[in-house]
């Protein structure tokens, strides 16, 4: 009989293993912040999923069958096997990265589980059915895995703070030891990653340049970049600064003390945490406010909230494509061709005609910001022109590639926002040869304007493409309503459960010369 107990116990533990791992992955995707993780739990209804409710029901049922061990163990084994197969077979867009922090949380999760099992085993000692009670306790832990994950994360807060403080102080000392280092901060609701890459490419023609890699745009990401990548020979350090709440930009500035700052955009992004566009603006301008009197702020005047915000603590240059009246750097005469884009930048006392492989007005705008800073740092026109002609699109940010079957893919999977999505659709509308498809799940983190802006996305898409494929459920109703309001026929509107299904449909029906725009790809935290 002991063997049956062991089987049930091991199967229950295995199901908890996969569930702990999944919950940790979601905590990681929510930046290890319990409040954001709880918001995801609430919005996704994960805490009351069918799998969790069935497991809870089985745990209760086994309590009433303790006198029939085979039935009890059988129920535990069946539900555990179902959970194991369900969880082990799932595919994720962004799998769990087992960092040292993730390992610490994992060990704490399991320590809490062991304490629960020991407590139940001790309380049931001598009763003759304590083994089954321990297995039932494991099922209960499965049901409460989200709470165990939050508890583990909370218990480790002092440990993480101590570790992070050590890394922070080390980075601070490194930066102090390089007083001649030119530090450029870049922030904005969107466009900051592309601008960072463009500026790095241009400045590299003259300077030894380091930029924060990937999406390392938090304080800890910058700390890690300094500690692991910054070397004494670097002359320029370009720091991308992200923010999801007030004070995030200031915190990074307090570490790196930038002398130049670029603000690429102020738009309705992360409204769930900022609540108002003014909150977004004030946070982005923490970068300008942190600059010294002899520093330089470079601000995109095409966004009303940025254009109207005064910068009087340091010198300020403004740039734009649409709002050129108050801009010192402007882009004019933009011509999009099949192979390249040609445009003219006026600023710094001259007009410079440039050629680039980049698509879209948003990318030209980002280039202008990079060109303005490069000019201020003394990079010659010849070097700027050469670098701009060699810049390649940042992956998943309005990048274009042609498949062997003649299909053109415009990949904007990581760059979806109200302004960027409109520009991406404008680029798609210019593709006059072949059928035009758009695949999109819509935009996220737009607060109370979520439905309104996704509906607007649908209306604009209806004027820009021939077939629209709406994936996932999160924004489906709003986008479809917008597509219909924009005049798109029902037979041209498709809804599919995920991106893979949509792309498979396109590959089956598209022909050589057709174009597909991939506009955003939601993370695993959204259905």
Image: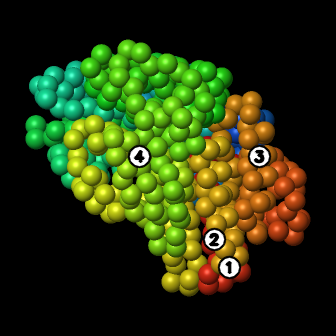
Q: Are marks 1 and 4 in contact (CB under 8 Å)?
A: no
Q: Nearer the viewer, residue 462 or 494?
A: 462
Foreground: disc 3 or disc 2: 2
- Where residue 388 sits: x, y (%)? 34, 57
First in sequence: mark 1 or mark 3?
1
Task: Determine which of the numbered discs, if any, sits on residue 346 in the image.
Answer: 4
Are circles 1 and 2 on residues that touch, CB within 8 Å?
yes
Q: Decide: marks 1, 3 in contact (CB < 8 A)?
A: no
Q: Position of residue 144 (x, y in %)?
A: 63, 32
Q: Nearer the viewer, residue 339 or 272?
A: 339
Of the image marks 3 and 2, the number of the one nearer the N terminus? 2
Number of residues whose C-alpha sits closer than 10 Å to that of mark 4, classed few (under 14), some (14–19) or many (20 or more): some
**Callout 1: SS:** loop
* Tag in front: 4 or 2: 4
Query: Label 2, on which residue?
Result: 431
Residue 456: give its label: 3
Location of residue 293 (image quadrant): top left
Q: Is residue 105 above or below residue 203?
A: above
**Left or right of residue 168, residue 231 in this image:** left
Residue 434, labelled with which disc?
1
Residue at horizontal 73 percent and vertical 65 percent from the top: 465
Q: CA distance from mark 1 to mark 4?
A: 36 Å
Cα–Cα gap, marks 3 and 2: 21 Å
User: In this image, 329 relative to 189: left or right?
Assistant: left
How far apart, in angstroms, are the residues tagged by discs 1 and 3?
25 Å
Element carrying mark 2: loop
Measured in 3D between alpha carbons, the distance from the residue under mark 3 to the one under mark 4, in whole angstroms, is: 33 Å
Q: Locate residue 152 relative to residue 457 in the image: left or right.
A: left
Q: Marks 4 and 2, Cα distance to the nearest angstrom? A: 28 Å
Q: Residue at x 29, y 23 (%)?
A: 295
């Amino acid at each position: 009989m002991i063997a049956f107990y062991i089987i049930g116990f091991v199967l229950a533990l295995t199901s908890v293993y996969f569930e702990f791992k999944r919950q940790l992955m979601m905590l990681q995707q929510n930046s290890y912040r319990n409040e954001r993780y709880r918001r995801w739990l609430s919005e996704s209804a994960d805490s009351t999923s069918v799998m969790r409710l069935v497991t809870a029901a089985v745990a209760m049922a086994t309590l009433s069958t303790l006198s029939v061990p085979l039935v009890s163990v059988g129920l535990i084994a069946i539900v555990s096997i179902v959970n194991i197969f369900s969880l082990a077979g799932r595919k994720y867009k962004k799998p769990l990265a087992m960092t040292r922090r993730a390992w610490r949380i994992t060990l704490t999760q399991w320590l809490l589980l062991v304490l629960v099992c020991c407590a139940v085993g001790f309380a049931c000692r001598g009763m003759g059915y304590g083994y089954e009670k321990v297995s039932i306790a494991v099922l209960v832990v499965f049901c409460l895995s989200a709470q165990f994950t939050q508890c583990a994360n909370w218990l480790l807060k002092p440990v993480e703070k101590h570790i992070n403080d050590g890394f922070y102080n080390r980075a601070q000392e490194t930066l102090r030891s390089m007083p001649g280092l030119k530090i450029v901060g870049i922030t904005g609701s969107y466009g900051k990653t592309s601008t960072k890459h463009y500026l790095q490419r241009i400045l590299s023609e003259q300077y030894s340049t380091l930029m924060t890699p990937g999406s390392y745009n938090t304080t800890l990401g910058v700390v890690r970049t300094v500690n692991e990548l910054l070397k004494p020979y670097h002359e320029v350090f370009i720091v991308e600064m992200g923010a999801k709440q007030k004070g995030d930009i200031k915190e990074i500035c307090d570490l790196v003390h930038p002398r130049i700052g670029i603000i690429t955009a102020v738009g309705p992004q992360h409204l769930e945490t900022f609540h108002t566009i003014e909150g977004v603006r004030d946070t982005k301008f923490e970068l300008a406010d942190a600059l010294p009197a002899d520093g330089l702020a470079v601000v995109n005047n095409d966004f009303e909230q940025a254009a109207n915000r005064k910068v009087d603590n340091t010198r300020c240059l403004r740039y734009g494509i649409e709002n050129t009246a108050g801009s010192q750097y402007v882009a004019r005469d933009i011509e999009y061709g099949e192979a390249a884009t040609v445009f003219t930048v006026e600023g710094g006392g001259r007009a410079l005609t440039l050629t680039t492989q980049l698509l879209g007005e948003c990318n030209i705008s980002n280039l202008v910001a990079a060109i303005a800073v490069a000019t201020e740092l003394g990079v010659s026109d010849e070097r700027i022109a050469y670098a701009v002609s060699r810049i390649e699109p940042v992956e998943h940010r309005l990048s274009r590639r042609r498949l062997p079957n003649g299909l053109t893919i415009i990949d904007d999977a990581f760059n979806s926002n109200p302004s960027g999505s409109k520009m991406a659709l404008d680029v798609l509308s210019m593709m006059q040869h072949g059928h035009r498809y758009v695949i999109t799940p819509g935009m996220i983190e737009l607060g109370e304007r979520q439905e309104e802006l996704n509906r607007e996305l649908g209306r604009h898409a209806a004027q820009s493409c021939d077939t629209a494929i709406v994936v996932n459920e999160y924004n489906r109703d709003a986008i479809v309503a917008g597509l219909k309001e924009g005049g798109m026929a029902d037979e041209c509107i498709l809804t599919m459960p995920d991106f893979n299904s949509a792309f498979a449909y396109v590959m089956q029906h598209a022909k050589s010369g057709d174009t597909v725009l991939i506009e955003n790809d939601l993370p695993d935290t959204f259905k």
